[in-house]
Image: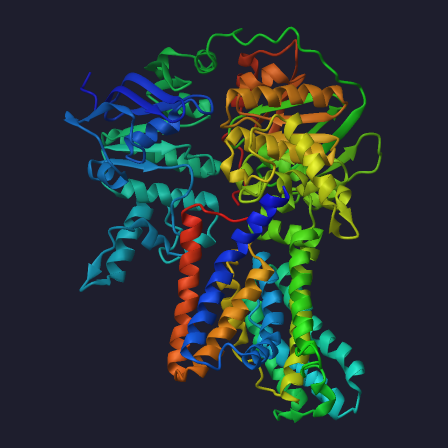
Amino acid sequence: MNDPLLSLQDLVKDYAVRVLDVSRLEFRSGQIHALLGANGAGKSTLSRIIAGLLLPTSGSMTLDGHTFAPENKLAAEAAGVQIVQQELNQISTLTVAENILLGRLPTKFGVIDRTELDRRARIALDRFGLEDISTDTVTGTMGIGRQQMIEIAAALDRECKMLILDEPTASLSAGESEKLFDWLDRLRKRGVAIIYITHRLEEVVRIADRVTVLRDGRHALTCPISEITVDELVDAMTGETGQSESRSDHPSFATCEPALKVVGMSRGRFVRDVSFTVHRGERLGIAGLVGSGRTELLRLLFGADRAERGDVFLSNDPSPRRFRNPAEAVAAGLAMVTEDRKESGLLLPLSIRVNATLASMTKQFSWFGLIRSGDERDVAERTRELMEIRCNSIGQPLETLSGGNQQKVAIAKWLVHDANIFFFDEPTRGIDVSSRRRIYKLFDQLAADGKAIVIVSSDLEELIQTCDRIAVMSVGRWVGEFERDQWSAEKIMQAAFSNPVSLHETVPSF
Amino acid sequence: MKNSSAYKLAIEYAGLIGVLAVLVGIFSTQSQNFFQIGTLISIANQIPDLTLVAVGMTLVLVVGGIDLSVGSILAFSSAVLGSLMVDWQLPLWAAIPFCISAGAACGLFNGCVTVLAKIPSFIVTLGMLEIARGATKLVTHSQTKYIGSAVEVIGEPIAGIMVSPAFLIAISAVIAGQFLLTRTVLGRYCTAIGTNHEAVRMSGVRTAPYAISVFVISGVLCGLAGLTHASRLSTADPNAAIGIELSAIAACVIGGTSLMGGRGNVINSFLGVLIIAVLQTGLAQIGVSDPMKQIVTGSVIVVAVLLDAMRSRWGITSA
């Protein structure tokens, strides 16, 4: 066996916590090396370090026998390492040819040489079987799948020894994926080392030579793909089974009275025909991989995006509803704590008081259009005590609070509003342990009060600890539901990694 | 509690009042005529138009928009007033509602197109700047309409208190504007929308009515400004108030209103108007040439914004 192209020694990356800690890992030329792991296992962190997009906290890398410590993407590219990231990095107003050759545009007397530009872009596209794409098409006018193909074609066009692909097939159609696999096979034969990150296990089995599993930032396993089964891979990703036992003291307040019934909710390829019911006093968790459509589902139910199909039934009301905007949903008693509190949850420069009462201004604090500031202050003070928000005063701007306390305010907004159905999207992401505990306690309190709660979280442990029932979504579909006494981390992960849409089914590309 | 809010108030306004005091001081030493009751009254009676426009502008800026059409709406409203009083022989009290409605209609158009069609207000009001000016010229047949004494009552000092009804209207607008911004649900939601529109929407608030009404308020205030402008000059001038949008934006910016939305204070904008007016009058009195006046005024605006930027960069936030 030949020497590895790239080897890593004791690579560590710390943010607030250690997110990556890999003692030894090697990648060989002429091999496709799959990188697997649950959300937050460190796959992207590792690939970003190799591609020069992140600096490691400590540790070293050796590429082709030389020390390799790229300070930025350009340095990594110069050394022969290319990355295609999940999100598109193209400039949508430029043409395909310009995007492919961006950073190395051919010039003649300081002016772009159009003929040469088109010729070279044409070669790059044809090589990848994209004969039907014209080089002077404006990139932004094409679908996401095509843009992703162009991005890959652009990366492949540059000379490289190592190519990193981060979930390249996430937005490709089946046909496009096939073309990609053909091309990866050819690259492998040319001796390129390929790191392939994906959530789709059947792809790994099909194209990879070796596989590495990361778990909680640590190296769990590396072996040739021929020596391992899919079940063993899932075990390696979730850790040993039975480790997450249900909390024995977890009382269930769930009643048989439905609070929210969803039928056939659909939007494009993100949410496909989802139906479920959540009862009063029930805590329903939704597990799934990033991109499985959980956030999109909540947004449809809340009216933040428009559903194409599907109806919502509230408690015992037999008439179907479909909310056209959040205002209608909120008026009907729904509340949503958004995934990204800074972008769509909070007014950071404004005070705790203003944020806490934002959703209930007209309902509770208005007297002929004037603000009843005494009431407002009292309620804000009470909420602050209830949620144990650590601050100097309720007049303090939110941007001066910690993430955990900000999140408490984002939740407090809906407590003040007294909603009946709560959606929590990643409610404890990036917050400290004590705030987390306070929020878990709140779930229990809300359930005891007969509220219905839907929690989307990528932290499976969190769902297992706090929920009465856990549903799983994969590729936009509702693929399973587990009651408290039936679930195990393994079963849930298996469902999350299942792909209800086979690779060969033609998926319309948008 | 009382003490701390008084302290906050002092901090909030101290900077601008200080600047104003320094300017008055400088001009008083340079010209014996400056610090005299006559000069102050003349300033007070000049500023109502700009004050009214600046109050509306502050609200529009707070909600995250901008209104470039204020000068044209002002001219259009005063043209409506002039036309009704001269051609139709309406008395002043009967013409005023039409004058204000004309402004409100323009504002409603601005607000609806901006908010419902989601087009930047910069573009929409730029269009309205041309539309309203064209309409003004249609109404007046591109000629200055002399209205005469019937309208002057608004602009002339009231015996005994020496200031005009126009000035009183402007001051009332400042107080009402500040009250609206700080004490009403509309004001609260405007600040919230200007800060983070998506967060307000996701909180279940219908944002459109609030955003639209702010443009209407700006239109109404331009209508009132059209009245005070016509009363001061006794005429409806089709070329009135060209460029007043820039002075109004300057006054708001001097007063610390953010062009990005979410932050503004009507009283501070009024202080901004005063600073601009004192500069104009003072510089004229000490015999500075017109070109120099422009250079100095421009510099004061830049310095004011610079100071404000430094203040927020150093994290010394007021209020």
Picture quadrant of residue A334: top right
Picture quadrant of residue A310: top right
A21 left or right of A8 in image: right
B22 left or right of A30 in image: right
User: x%, y% of residue A152?
Assistant: 35, 41
A153 left or right of A237 in image: left
User: x%, y% of residue B3?
Assistant: 60, 45
Q: Nearer the viewer, residue A305 or A60?
A: A60
A55 is higher (above) or lower (below) than B293: above
Task: Work out whether residue A335 can be spotted.
Answer: no
Task: Work out whether residue A163 can be spotted.
Answer: yes
User: x%, y% of residue A309?
Assistant: 69, 41
Picture quadrant of residue A164: top left
Which color scheme does this rendered protein use? rainbow
Q: Which of B91 and A428 is in front in this view?
A: B91
Q: Residue at x 68, y 87 (%)?
A: B139
Q: Which of A366 and A428 is in front in this view?
A: A366
B33 is higher (above) or lower (below) than B189: below
A359 is higher (above) or lower (below) than B298: above
Q: Residue at x 24, y 61 (%)?
A: A113
User: x%, y% of residue A27?
Assistant: 26, 23
Q: Residue at x 54, y 42 (%)?
A: A348
